[in-house]
Structures are given as C-alpha cells and as structure tokens.
Amino acid sequence: MTNVTVSALRRLSTACDPAVDLWLGCGVAELFPKRLMEYEHDRVFLVTSEKLRGIADRLHSLLTDGGVSVAPVMLIPEGEPNKNWRTLQGLLEALVQSGCTKSSVIVGIGGGVVSNVTGLAAALLYRGVDFVEVPTTLLNLTDGVLSNKQAVNGGQGKNQFGVYHAPIFVWGDTAYLQTEPIEQWRSGVVEAVKNGLINDAGWFDHLELVLTPDLSCVRDDPVGFCADLISSKAQILDKDPGERERCMVLEYGHTVGHAVEFLMDGQLLHGMAVGVGMCAAAKIGSRLGITDDDVLPRQEEILGKGLGCPIDVPANCAPDAITDIVRTDNKRRGSCDARMVFVEKVGTVHEVNGEVEVTVPHSLLLEVLQCSRRA
C-alpha cells in the first residue's frame, strides 16, 4: 500500500448533530493550512503518537510555511490500554503549560485513541476549545469521526467517561491510511459490513462480491471506497443525527464486541471484536426467533472468508467475564440484563414500537458465549 494517487478534495458531511464538513481526498495535505485559516484562532496545537510523528511534522511545516502559529508537536501514547484518565490528564496539563487558550485550535492526528483523547481534552479544557480531527486509520475516518463522541475507558469497560463534542471539521486524507497494516484496514471494513446488515441489503450484497482478505477493492480506490462507506453510515445517521433513538441500530455487535475488546486489552482491534460480537448477536437472535437462519452463515462467510477476521469468542475471554463487563456497558439502561440490537434479515433490524433493543436473559447470553468460544 505504498502508492499514493493524488485526488481532488471532496466535501462531505459527518451527518451528526451538529454536522460538520468532512473533507476527503488523497495526498491533499497542502490544502490543509488554507482550510484551517478559515477559522479564527491564536495558535494551533498538533497532537499525535510517536508512530505518526512524520505526518504531524509535515503538517506542522505546511502550517508554519502558511503563516500559522503552531506549537511544537505533542505526543501521547497510542493503543487501547492508553485510552485512559492518565493519558487525558497528561495531555491537558501539557496543553495548559504550552500556552493553549480558549481561542486555540487543537488538531488530533491518529486513530480512535488519539482522536478520542484529543477530542475529550478539547471538550474539557476551559469548558471547550475548538479542535480538528485528522484520522489516519480507515476505521476512524469512516466510522469514529462520524459521531462527535469523545471518551476514555474506565477500569470496568470501554468509553465509560465522555461527552459529545464536535470538531470544527474533519480532514480525511486517505494517503495517511498507508501507514496502517492490513489488519487495521480489515477492522475498519467490518463496520461497513455492519452498516449493510442493519440498513442496506444492497450494500451488503455488494460487499459479499468484492471483499477479499487482501482488500484490493479498497486499495484500488481508497477515496471512492471511503466515500461509499461514509455514505452507508450517513444514511443511518440522517434518521437520528444525535444517535439517541433510531441510531442505536449502529450498536449491533457492540455489546459483546466492546466487552471482548476490553478483555483483550488491545490485542484485538475494535472492528475484529465487533465482528465477533455480531456473530454472537446473530446466534442469540436465532435462539430468540428474531434472526433469519441465513444471517449467521452469511455473516460468518463475509467476515471469516471475505475479510479473514475472527468470528468466535477468543479462548482467553471467559464468558462470565464478558457478561460482567456487559453489565457496566456505557449504554446500559435500567435492567441488569443485556440489551442488544438484532438483525431480522440482512438489511433490516428488529424493531417493535420504535424500540430497537431487546432484553436478553443473562442465562441465554452466557450459554451462547460458552458455545461460541474458540477451542
């Protein structure tokens, strides 16, 4: 994935509430300073990880050459285990010490961890500072930035502490995706599969035809594929931009997926864990008489053979440990039993009187997890 074909800049929307511009292109870094200068600010602060220092240094040079006042690049540790209060506090203290003000702009350059920590820092600092998201992973570009959700993990689960805080815009340069390994590309495409399962049978059918473990369909046209993937989620967000009601369908696979991801402590990427969670959900939905018989085999085929992703609960994730984390899920409401989203048939989510979540008895969840555990 070393060849980069420069493309024109496209203006899309995050389709959230509030919605902001998502600028999408390939090799478009030189256009970033002009876009940022459209917003009043006194100084710019770039936040990234050591691995992505080269991208940040390049943007720093372009901004400086463009007459923008830029502080030295700030580094935070990446990886799910570092998405915590300690990393957040360290960044906040560094921003204050470096002279960040209420009129500054903070730019988060990285994947979901860097974006979330930076976004939450921007929301908390002086009760709100402007920030820009520059996603460098397929998952963050096509899913993470389309939510306005900023959070860190707690000791008992993912994203337990956070707020909604929108960036002033998102800068999506697919050239940056070249820095991530194929496994992270696959992780991002799992969310594309999910969008088809819950909302668009035609999109799912298309992915069944084109997906291969080497992801040639993405590499051949990264801008086009990302635009299509963003559109697939935007169609869902249009119905509920604040993700408070109907958009709960986006949580398909996340109840178990988040718990598995948390227990794996960074050893299983987010999309991979969600894929495991989707297969568990299809099994539970089938037991409840909700999910059609063809959903699970089609899911397992596209995730396992089409993407080369795991479909079983990892052997070192004990079912009772998963259910303990599910009880503290960040979307839990009322009952101690799990509340889950189920697919009736490909492209359609189970819904009763506008409610898309179903209560799952603890015993059933535990039984399915035990049967789904990798030998």
Image (cartoon, grey):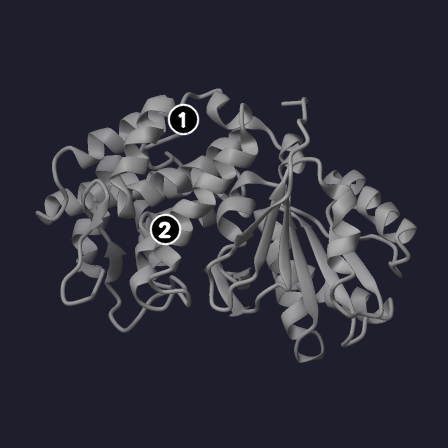
Q: Which residue is mark 2?
A: 254
Residue 375 position (above or below residue 286)? above
Q: Secondary structure at mark 1?
A: loop
Q: Which mark is residue 307?
A: 1
Q: Residue at x 34, y 26 (%)?
A: 304
Q: Position of residue 43 (x, y in %)?
A: 84, 66
Residue type at numbered disc 1 = Leu
* Mark 2–mark 1 distance (CA, rounded to whole Å): 18 Å
Residue 221 visible (yes or no): yes
- 245 and 310: which one is in front? 245
Q: Is residue 5 left or right of residue 97?
A: left
Q: Residue at x 11, y 49 (%)?
A: 288
- 62 and 101: which one is in front? 62
Residue 331 position (above or below residue 268)? below
Q: Position of residue 298 (x, y in %)?
A: 23, 30
* Quadrant showing the C terminus: top left
Q: Position of residue 335 (x, y in %)?
A: 24, 70
Residue 50 visible (yes or no): no
Q: Position of residue 90 (x, y in %)?
A: 74, 63
Q: Earlier in the sequence, mark 2 or mark 1?
A: 2
Q: Secondary structure at mark 2?
A: helix
Query: Given this view, does label 2 or label 1 mark the residue nearer the observer?
Result: 1
Asked if the residue under mark 1 is in contact with the one under mark 2, i.e. CB atoms within 8 Å, the reply is: no
Residue 146 position (above or below residue 269)? below
* Quadrant showing the N terminus: top right
How many numbered marks, from 0 up? 2
Dot 1: within a 10 Å radius of its alpha carbon, few (fewer than 14), some, or many (20 or more) residues? many
- 309 and 108: which one is in front? 108
Residue type at numbered disc 2 = His
Q: Residue at x 17, y 54 (%)?
A: 350
Q: Is residue 185 left or right of residue 357?
A: right
